[in-house]
Amino acid sequence: MNVTRGFTGRPRVHNAGLPPGQYDAGDDWPVLSAEVTPDLAPADWTLRIDGLVAEPRTWDWEQAHALPASSYEGDIHCVTSWSKFGVRFGGVSLDTLLEAVRPDPAATHAVAYSHTGYTANLPLADLSGGRAWIVWEYDGRPLPAEHGGPARLIVPHLYFWKSTKWIAGIRILDHDEPGFWEQNGYHARGNPWEEQRYSGD
Amino acid sequence: MTETTTFVPPKTFVPPTAFVPPTRFAVPGRIAVNTSTATTWQTATLTEIRRETAHAATFRFAVPAWEGHLPGQHLMLRLTAGDGYVAQRHYSIASSPDDTGHIELTLDHVDGGEVSGWFHTVARPGDSVDVRGPLSGFFAWPGDRPALLVGAGSGVVPLMSMLRHHRARGLDVPLRLLVSARSPEELIYAPEYGDETTAVFTRAAPDGVPVGRMTAAHMAPLLAEQPPGGWEAYICGSNGFAEHASRLLVEAGQPVDRIRIERFG
């Protein structure tokens, strides 16, 4: 450990919810996307799940909203080192959607993709078991476009780049396939508690 | 049981075809990131501090084992307190790749910023910090395509690395820079700009220069002089600026899938 002369850090209390190397962003919610924010109306939004599934399906806005509601309340962690505590998202559990399409037993991974073309790879296990949602509400209000509205994926136990904004679809695969940032040097899985930031961490 | 020997031809390795979603932005990174340099912390020794504006200064570091970067890339910087507490931040690299063994970062003094605060009030030549990188192959410009650069405030930092690279190598690929600052006093790198740059001032401007935010009128001439093959656009600044500038560019005709954005919040 290389101690930095004269550096003490800001006053802090021990926070068990803060993964290593992260800081509490407080009320801020930085926007980090590499593309132009799309002008996507709810009426034009669709979500498709296909690939290695028994019954590929596409939901539109109304069909998605007719599914049983589910919410996430907890923390989120960005690889750029901020974390945000106690956020509240509303939408539908990905388990509900996966039940409808019935993934093949050979399925192991998925690629989530946005209406802009951004991709992120995920082990299927990270998308099931109550660990992932498609959400359209933030703090009881419609999800803002710059944060992925009208709807985004959230996988809050992984770094937030995995939580694809403007979610358009999820393709189920029997192998892992690096997504956009993973091809650009970021970690294949991105567990904040293991500090899996970059490929090789 | 007899065993027959059958010639089995070696399996030809067929690389998996990446899934490309049916959308417009699917811009693959052009630049491979070296994962060993991206994950190895290196000691960077501060050799020089240059004031740029009242709020921004450039910090020059010697990093002997730095393997080089591409203009536009960033790194992760780490400060460690005596009790083991660490603070990590991403910063864009300001210097050109040809500045071998050295990198420069230009940092704004952020109100209450624990890392930028240390740099602006404590740091002095001889101090050392940890860095790893370069990172990300997306917001990177190797100098191969016409580049239209749009930045505001310290968002000009990675764009300056591109401009310096263009000059240092004497590249003839077209490059234009549109930079926004509150006032001439707050324009980072002001003495270095040339004919390729247009400055926009939002609060105070020299006599005869209008005051106001970037508009469609700033974009129009740049897109009118579109080079063969079109511009590759790079936008860097606060999220509010990035949203505004990217909308202007799209409205002026720049294809959405040829705009790369680096935002800081």
Image: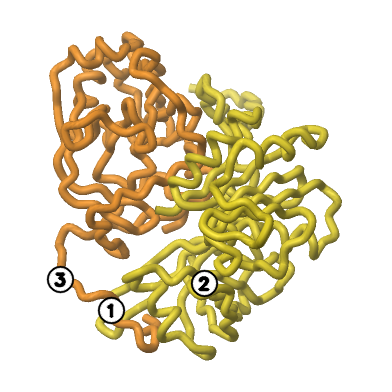
Chain colours: A orange, B yellow
Q: In the rendered image, is residue A160 in sight?
A: yes
B190 lies above or below B25: below
Q: Position of residue B167 (x, y in %)?
A: 79, 62
Quick check: can you spot residue B33? no
In the foreground, B149 or B44: B149
The chain containing the residue under callout 1 comes to B
Figure quadrant of the N terminus of chain A: bottom left
When the figure is inspected, residue A25 is found, relative to residue B47, above or below; the finding is above
Residue at the image position 64 percent from the left and 68 percent from the top: B189
In this rendering, is residue A62 above or below A146?
above
Looking at the rendering, which quadrant does residue B156 occupy? bottom right
Q: Label 3 lies in what chain? A: A
Which residue is pictured at 71% across the width and 45% down the height?
B147
Report x, y in % for residue A34: 50, 42
Q: CA distance from mark 1 to mark 3?
A: 14 Å
User: What residue would you read off at disc 1?
Assistant: B84
- Which mark's residue is nearer the viewer, 3 or 2? 2
Q: Are marks 1 and 3 on the same chain?
A: no
What residue would you read off at disc 2?
Answer: B56
Which quadrant is home to the C terminus of chain A? bottom left
- Secondary element under disc 1, as helix, strand or loop, is loop
Residue tagged by mark 3? Answer: A13
Q: Of helix, strand and loop, which one carries label 3? A: loop
Q: Amino acid at mark 2?
A: Ala
* C-alpha separation, residue under disc 1 versus residue under disc 2: 28 Å
Indicate the secondary structure of the residue bearing disc 2: strand
Position of residue B216 in the picture relative to residue A75 (left or right): right
Amino acid under disc 3: Val
Three-letter amino acid code at disc 1? Gly
Badge 2: chain ID: B
Where does residue A116 sit, x and y in percent of width and height? 49, 28
Going from N to C along the chain, the mark reached first, 1 or 2, is: 2
